[in-house]
Image (cartoon, rainbow, N blue to C red):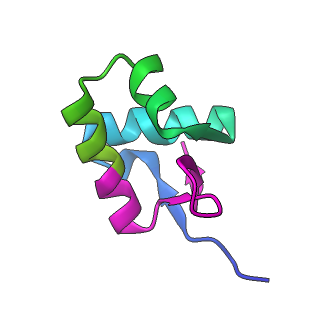
Amino acid sequence: MTTKKTVELNNIENQFEKDILLFLKERGECIYGEIIKDLQMSSARGQEAIYSLINQGYVKHLNKTSRLKLNIDLKE
C-alpha cells in the first residue's frame, strides 16, 4: 500500500488551489466542471488551478475520466 503525501493547507499560496483542495476533501471526488461551477470560478482560472494541482500530484483523474479526487492527505 502506498502512503499518500501529507500537505498542509497553510503551505498552499494560491487561494483558488486551496479552495479546490478543500472542495475535494469534502466531496471525495467530483467532475472537473462541477468544481469550477460550484466554486464560481472563471473557466480559465479554474482550469489553471486544477492543472497546477494535477502537475504537483495533489489531485488526480479517476480511471482516465473527468472525475478528480485528492491524491494527498490534506492537513488543515
Q: How many marks?
A: 0
Image side of residue 3 versus residue 38, left or right: right
Q: Nearer the viewer, residue 9 or 4?
A: 4
Q: Nearer the viewer, residue 7 or 1?
A: 1
Q: Residue at x 44, y 46 (%)?
A: 9
Q: Residue 67 colored magenta?
A: yes
Where does the image place residue 41, in percent across and percent down from the top left? 30, 22
- The residue at the point 44 percent across, 68 percent down is 57
Q: Residue 73 or 59: which is nearer the viewer?
A: 59
The picture quadrant where one finds residue 37 is: top left
For the C terminus, the image quarter is top right
* Magenta region includes residue 69: yes
**The N terminus - image quarter:** bottom right
Vertically, is 26 above or below 14?
Answer: above
Q: Is residue 68 left or right of residue 43?
A: right
In the image, 26: left or right of 46?
A: right
> Magenta span covers which residues?
51-76
Who's the residue at 47% across and 53% down the image? Answer: 8
Q: Is residue 19 above or below residue 61?
A: above
Q: Residue furthest bottom?
A: 1
Q: In the image as oriented, which residue stretches furthest toward the left?
A: 44
Question: What residue do we see at 63% from left, 58% from top?
Answer: 62
- The picture quadrant where one finds residue 23 is top right
x and y percent of residue 66 in the render? 53, 48
* Residue at the front extreme of this rendering: 65
Position in image of residue 16 (x %, y %): 30, 34
Dividing the picture into quadrants, the one containing residue 29 is top right
Is residue 72 visible from the viewing direction of this image? no
Residue 27 visible within the image: yes
Task: Tell me if 2 is positioned left or right of 10 in this view.
Answer: right
Q: Position of residue 19 (x, y in %)?
A: 41, 32
